Image (tube, rainbow, N blue to C red):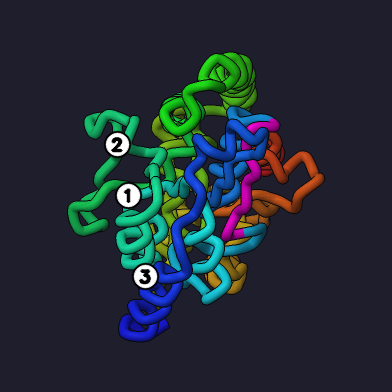
Amino acid sequence: MPKLLLALLLLALAGCGPVQPPSARVLEGEAIDVVATIGMISDAVEQVGGDRVAVEGLMGPGIDPHLYKASEGDLRRLERADVIFYNGLHLEAKMADVLERIGERRATSAVTDAIPRNRLQSPPAFAGQYDPHVWFDVGLWMLAVEQIRDTLSELDPGSAALYRRNAAAYLVELERLDAYVREQASLIPERRRVIITAHDAFNYFGEAYGFEVRGLQGISTAAEAGAGDVQGLARFIAERRIPAIFVESSVSPRTIQAVREAVQARGFDVEIGGSLFSDAMGDPGTPEGTYVGMVRHNIDTIVEGLRG
């Protein structure tokens, strides 16, 4: 959407009158209207907020947040919201102007603000910016849950005790999830703990759970992979005899298929180990449509593919 058109639309929406503040609707028993950018955040807000929130997600299954542009309908949703939760760290890069302008009139919260910067990764190839894929380290994502709890409590202090109870219960579940991932990862021989996917989304996962990570594209899927990148990765796979590589649910499988063909041309047959959820979760109503289910699916798929 051109910036001039965006500015005009935002100006028009701002003139439609003020939205009733959350505190007023709380007294009337109405839920707080929440908009979240990605599914992992939507799920966390629902877990913490319970019946006190009505959550609308912008980016559903299979949507790549790196490339997502806000539609006119999204702008109207954002303007109606009491609070907007987003990841930050440039994940929603093409929505940056929208979030900045909306933030002048609506409560916004970047869930990664709660994470100490010394715990974030800043790969040299990412132009001095932080890697935004923090949800792959369950321990870091627990800090994001705490940020959601605190933001909701500030907006709706009368329900703060509810948010604390819900968050505490969810954090216990996430502690169990973290332990499960570590237990499953230990089943893979150390020399085979190498995750190869379409883009560099799994670096936090690798650091937390002991995997070497290689992505064909960079941190953002906006980066293009060339023939040299494909051949370099194929050489690495063939030399290390990596048993499986993985496609991602929100990224075209075309480039990973090209890597596999390049490996086969070198005399080694690497398998496609399955599809991992990276920047988006699964369909609503399925186990993979929740953060916990998504993480469990990923580690189970990785273990099955790399154990050989």
Residue 54 among magenta residues: yes
Apparent side of residue 15 relative to residue 40 in the rendered image (left or right): left
Residue hosting label 2: 120
Q: Earlier in the sequence, mark 2 or mark 3?
A: 2
Kind of residue at badge 1: Leu
Q: Residues within 10 Å of mark 3 (few under 14, many from 20)?
A: few
Kind of residue at badge 3: Ala
Going 59% across and 70% down the picture, which residue do you hit? 252
Nearer the observer, 125 or 1: 1
Tell me where residue 259 appears, x and y as whole percent: 53, 67
Q: Which span of residues is magenta-colored?
A: 51-59
**Which disc, if any, is residue 89?**
1
Kind of residue at badge 2: Leu
**Which disc, if any, is residue 223?**
3
Any part of residue 295 in sight: no
Apparent side of residue 282 relative to residue 146 in the rendered image (left or right): right
Q: Secondary structure at mark 1?
A: loop
Q: Earlier in the sequence, mark 3 or mark 1?
A: 1
